[in-house]
Image (tube, grey):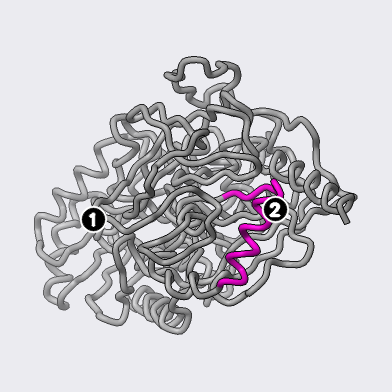
């Protein structure tokens, strides 16, 4: 174990909508503008906020999810991402004490703050209160003695008089006020059915919004006090996560759900060593979809693929009419293909090339948006036709953590491998599962989902590969085999 001191803060809130994304992103940018190397992090599975964090800091946004990756990996992942930085800012999720449904504090902001031994700054929407703010802050600060609520930032303050009333009320709370941010339209960031609009879709506006957020934070917050608080965090004693060692297994404390699927092997907790290791001589090209339609990706996935021996090459299905040269495997993550369905459908050359690659048996892995893109159609428009399914927008939001098991051997996992993931979509596919489903969900309800055949694995389930050891190495091994087979055929 290594003792490492990284100054750090967790930016939390009593509830969603309090303004923690605005404050956290503005604080990251304000620190970066002051010449500090800032490590940005987000609690939970969200993909969009880390994009704004990356824009604010110039470093990759990273997620800390105690449900998908296990509590024992939170500190190692943090240490990996924050290595060499002057300060780390961790944006929370939902309300401070809201975690995985029905599982207590698991994966809550409070849980992650305790795992990181980090002080918490509570962002309070003060727009409709004055003296009551003291009772609110007192309740959150005293609820769990292990959570150190060490400061308050008052958000959406209306006037000097309003600020004075709030500060007076909080004088006796014992929790210092470290900022008061005024209401301002220019710090607003637009949203739609799944949250904020990703940075990749609004680069100029996003840059302006982040700059405005930083200006408001600088104007209203005690940056020196916040930095001093971050530096008061104690050293973390743990080993940083390393992508090249990710298939060594999972911690013994990682929760293992009971398998509810008859006939599925029971061995292991989700960690497995790949049958074959990396293939550095082959350097198979793994093409990863990006651009405005496919913005959802965890930074660690690319690191894991590269550590396993892959050459990772991004491409944009909206603009590129062919896959990258020597593509041996394809990864298509989440995003908003429903917004870009006409453009994706119009790129017929690429759709045909994706279908041709899948027909060879090469690994083609798709999550959520990627599932829609591989379907026959999306809202009536032709897609790649790799899957025997049609996709459409629906009026129903499917949202939440899931426990799942691989029902059969596939390109990502051997049969019986258990994972924890997350669903977040307003679309459906008909049918919802193929003859060989990608996963069998075991919690919160029992059902099959997705499609797995030959080298194709397509599902609505988002999985953080740092919590599913061996996944990337297995994919790269299959890509190397596919690349070798292609060479033999030529």
- Magenta highlight: main SS: helix
Could you say which quadrant of the image residue 415 lies in? top right
Q: Is residue 32 above or below residue 374?
A: below
Q: Position of residue 26 (x, y in %)?
A: 41, 71
Q: Is residue 392 visible?
A: yes
Residue shown at 51% from the left, 41% from the top: 451
State left or right for residue 477 relative to residue 200. Answer: right
Could you say which quadrant of the image residue 217 lies in? bottom left
Tell me the residue that label 2 is attached to. Answer: 329
Tell me the element at label 2: strand
Tell me the residue that label 1 is attached to. Answer: 395
Could you say which quadrant of the image residue 272 lies in? top right
Calculate the distance from the C-alpha at mark 2 to the C-alpha at mark 1. 34 Å
Residue 156, numbered circle: none
Image quarter where the C terminus lies is bottom right
Dot 2: within a 10 Å radius of its alpha carbon, few (fewer than 14), some, or many (20 or more) residues?
Answer: many
């Amino acid at each position: 174990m290594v003792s490492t001191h990284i100054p750090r803060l967790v930016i939390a809130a009593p509830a969603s909508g309090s303004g923690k994304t605005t404050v956290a992103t503005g604080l990251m940018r304000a620190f970066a503008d002051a010449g500090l190397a800032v490590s940005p992090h987000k609690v939970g599975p969200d993909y969009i906020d880390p994009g704004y964090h990356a824009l604010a800091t110039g470093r990759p946004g990273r997620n800390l999810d105690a449900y998908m990756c296990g509590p024992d990996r939170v500190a190692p992942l943090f240490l990996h991402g924050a290595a060499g930085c002057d300060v780390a800012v961790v944006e929370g999720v939902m309300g401070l004490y809201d975690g995985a449904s029905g599982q207590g504090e698991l994966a809550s902001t409070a849980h992650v703050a305790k795992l990181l031994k980090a002080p918490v700054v509570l962002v309070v929407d003060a727009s409709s209160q004055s003296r009551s703010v003291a009772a609110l802050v007192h309740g959150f600060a005293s609820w769990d003695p292990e959570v150190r609520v060490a400061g308050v930032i008052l958000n959406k303050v209306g006037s000097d008089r309003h600020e004075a009333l709030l500060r007076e009320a909080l004088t006796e709370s014992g929790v210092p006020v470290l900022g008061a941010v005024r209401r301002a339209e220019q710090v607003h960031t637009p949203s739609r059915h799944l949250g904020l609009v990703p940075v990749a879709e609004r680069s100029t506006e996003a840059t302006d919004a982040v700059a405005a957020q930083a200006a408001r934070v600088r104007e209203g917050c005690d940056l020196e006090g916040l930095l001093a608080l971050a530096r008061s965090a104690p050293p973390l004693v743990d080993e940083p996560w390393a992508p090249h060692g990710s298939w060594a297994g999972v911690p013994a404390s990682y929760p293992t759900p009971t398998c509810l699927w008859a006939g599925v092997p029971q061995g292991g907790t989700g960690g497995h060593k790949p049958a074959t290791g990396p293939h550095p001589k082959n350097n198979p090209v793994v093409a990863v979809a990006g651009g405005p339609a496919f913005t959802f990706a965890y930074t660690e996935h690319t690191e894991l693929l590269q550590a396993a021996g892959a050459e990772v090459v991004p491409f944009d299905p909206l603009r590129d009419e062919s896959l990258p040269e020597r593509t041996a495997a394809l990864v298509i993550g989440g995003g908003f293909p429903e917004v870009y369905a006409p453009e994706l459908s119009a790129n017929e050359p690429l759709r045909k090339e994706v279908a041709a690659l899948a027909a060879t048996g090469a690994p083609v892995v798709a999550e959520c948006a990627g599932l829609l893109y591989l379907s026959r159609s999306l809202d009536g428009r032709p897609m790649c036709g790799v899957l025997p399914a049609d996709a459409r927008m629906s009026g129903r939001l499917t949202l939440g953590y899931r426990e799942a098991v691989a029902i059969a051997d596939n390109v990502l996992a051997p049969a019986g491998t258990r994972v924890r993931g997350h669903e977040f979509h307003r679309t459906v596919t008909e049918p919802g599962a193929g003859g060989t489903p990608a996963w069998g969900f075991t919690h919160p309800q029992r059902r099959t989902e997705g499609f797995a055949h030959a080298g194709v694995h397509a599902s609505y389930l988002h999985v953080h590969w740092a919590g599913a050891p061996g996944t990337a190495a297995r994919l790269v091994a299959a890509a190397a085999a596919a690349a070798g087979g292609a060479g033999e055929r030529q």
